[in-house]
Amino acid sequence: MFRKLRFKKPVSRAEDTPIESEEQAESAEPVDLDKGQSISERKAAEDAFNRARDNTYDPLLRVTEVKRTFQVGSERIQVLKGINMEVSQGQLVMLKGRSGSGKTTLLNMLGGLDLPTEGEIWFKNEPFSTWSDEKRTYTRRQDIGFIFQAFALMPLLSAYENVELSLRMAKVPKSLWKPRVQHCLELVGLGKRMNHRPYEMSGGEQQRVAIAKAIAHKPLLLLADEPTADLDTQMVAQVMGVFHQIIRTENISICMTTHDPTILEVADHVYEMVDGRFVSKVGAAPTV
Ligand SMILES: Nc1ncnc2c1ncn2[C@@H]1O[C@H](COP(=O)(O)OP(=O)(O)OP(=O)(O)O)[C@@H](O)[C@H]1O
């Protein structure tokens, strides 16, 4: 038997993040994003979205000497202690490590949701971690997709509506929503379940909707925090199969955290984190 994915209440954050709340989902409903645009503006927006994401960046993501310290009361806790890593285009990179080792803290930084105390993060050959909140938010909306528990599916919306919501939030022209939503749900094998709500689906199916939602706006980088947690072996295999397919067909790179030793072998690189440091790296790229 599968276990249903939990729906955590979205975390509230000061800046605009890819997390969507039920309220945002509802208030987003009647908005026609194409309204007020001239025909030529609309056409330009459609062309931009339809253009193949064929730029090459080598690497797509580079992390150099990243440290992160949190102030808790009078105590300073160093969670990341000098992280170096790279993610190239078309790669599946995994971060493994015990609970509390710092994986989620690092993933938050890779997505620009948090900033290093020291060190730099470069994305698309640009110094992402030095940008303003506004510029990071814009890039995140365009180029990064998230599969985090806190950004889970909206329980009252169907699979179709959940994926569509992601296109609304990314301000993709409305005329493109239907074909893109259908494409993404077919890509994850849920073409026949588009009208089902999350509670009518298995945990693996819900996670595949979450993948469709995270890639709908054509990001270059997909960040996933424990995307196979709570899934049985067969569903884990389905999710990993979908990951490989989207890497091949959508020109996406994936960086994910995991505790599951059985899936590490399908990664291009595995970084092992212990107490805020990488202690090993398996894979072909330069060692840390
Ligand atoms: N905002 C924060 N303030 C203080 N400490 C924090 C904060 N965020 C994370 N930490 C601490 O940093 C450490 C690493 O947490 P993190 O969530 O990154 O670990 P993890 O490897 O992802 O764990 P898990 O696998 O359980 O999700 C923990 O000890 C945590 O309490």
Image (cartoon, rainbow, N blue to C red):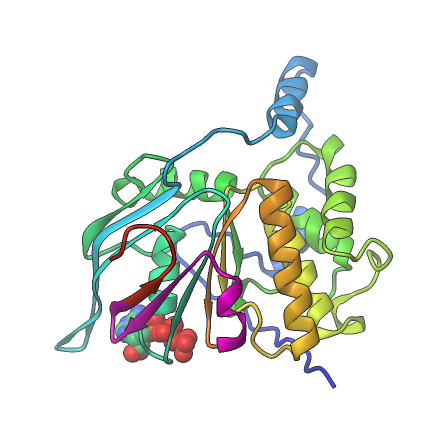
Q: Position of residue 159 (x, y in %)?
A: 76, 58
Image quarter of the C terminus: bottom left
Q: Residue furthest front?
A: 284
78 vs 60, nearest the viewer: 60
Q: Position of residue 147 (x, y in %)?
A: 55, 60
Figure quadrant of residue 132 = top left
Magenta-colored stretch includes residue 17: no
Magenta-colored stretch includes residue 267: yes
Quadrant location of ligand 1? bottom left
Image quarter of the N terminus: bottom right
**Whether residue 28 can be seen here:** yes
Q: Residue furthest right?
A: 192
Q: Position of residue 167 (x, y in %)?
A: 64, 43
Q: Residue at x 37, y 53 (%)?
A: 284
Q: Residue at x 40, y 34 (%)?
A: 57
Q: Residue at x 58, y 47 (%)?
A: 247
Figure quadrant of residue 244 = bottom right
263 vs 231, nearest the viewer: 263
**Whether residue 154 can be seen here:** no
Apparent side of residue 244 relative to residue 115 in the rendered image (left or right): right
Figure quadrant of residue 58 = top left
Q: Residue at x 73, y 50 (%)?
A: 187
Q: State which region is magenta.
A: 261-279
Q: Position of residue 123 (x, y in %)?
A: 36, 41
164 vs 35, nearest the viewer: 164
